[in-house]
Amino acid sequence: MGKWAVVAQYGLRQVYVTEILSRVEGTREEAREALLEATRRYHPPRREHRRQVYRLPGGDSYLLVVEGAVSRREITLSLAELVYDSAAPSAVDVHGPEQEPASATVAPEAEPEAAASEQEQEPEPLPEGARPAPAPEPRAWDADVPERPAWWGRTDLPESG
């Protein structure tokens, strides 16, 4: 048995939103049933004219297209399986340490001398009474924008107008 979340993702004006609609504890099939149910009841607009549900490859996600009186929303509903939870009693991978992914590689630890030489060394203290050099002023946001665009005055471009 796994822990699953039914997730909705959609664009709202200039923001991309991800929200968890429900949590399911059970088999993948039980989670898929909850996902399919979410496609039927998620965000009905006040005057819904049409609702289309497309299953995406793999069966763990759907594209929901809801057309209202004046708007159209496209929402991706999908399943997410919990694979790690830091609040779990042992704070380990929920699949257990014996089932590490095949692609996981562990880098060998560096030797202590090499690690010490890689760290930044502290700057030497200034002589008494000396002031540190002032920090450079930040560049303006448009510092690299030319005063005149490169295309200005070109004769090989078609005229607009």
Image: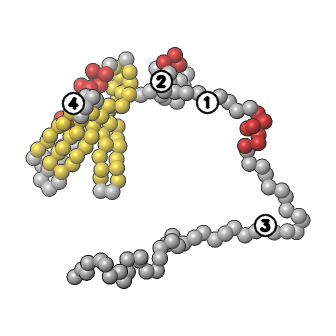
Q: Is residue 80 left or right of residue 120?
A: left
Q: Are marks 3 and 2 in contact (CB under 8 Å)?
A: no
List x then y, in percent, for residue 57.
Answer: 25, 31
Is residue 153 visible in the rendered structure shown here? yes
In which quadrant of the rendered view does residue 91 lie? top right
Q: Amino acid at mark 4?
A: Glu
Task: Please give the residue where the numbered disc 2 appears in the rendered image.
Answer: 101
* Amino acid at circle 1: Ala
Mark 2 vs 4, N-terminal side: 4
Query: What's the amino acid at mark 3?
Result: Pro
Q: CA distance from mark 3 to mark 1?
A: 40 Å
Q: Give the label on residue 37, or none.
A: 4
Is residue 56 depicted above or below 101 in this figure?
below
Question: Image point 32% across, 19% down: which residue?
Answer: 27
Q: What is the quadrant of the N terminus in the image? A: top left
Q: Amino acid at mark 2?
A: Pro
Residue 40, label in figure: none
Q: Nearer the viewer, residue 116 or 79?
A: 116
Screen quadrant of the C terminus: bottom left
Q: Residues within 10 Å of mark 2 (few under 14, many from 20)?
A: few
Q: Which residue is mark 1?
A: 107
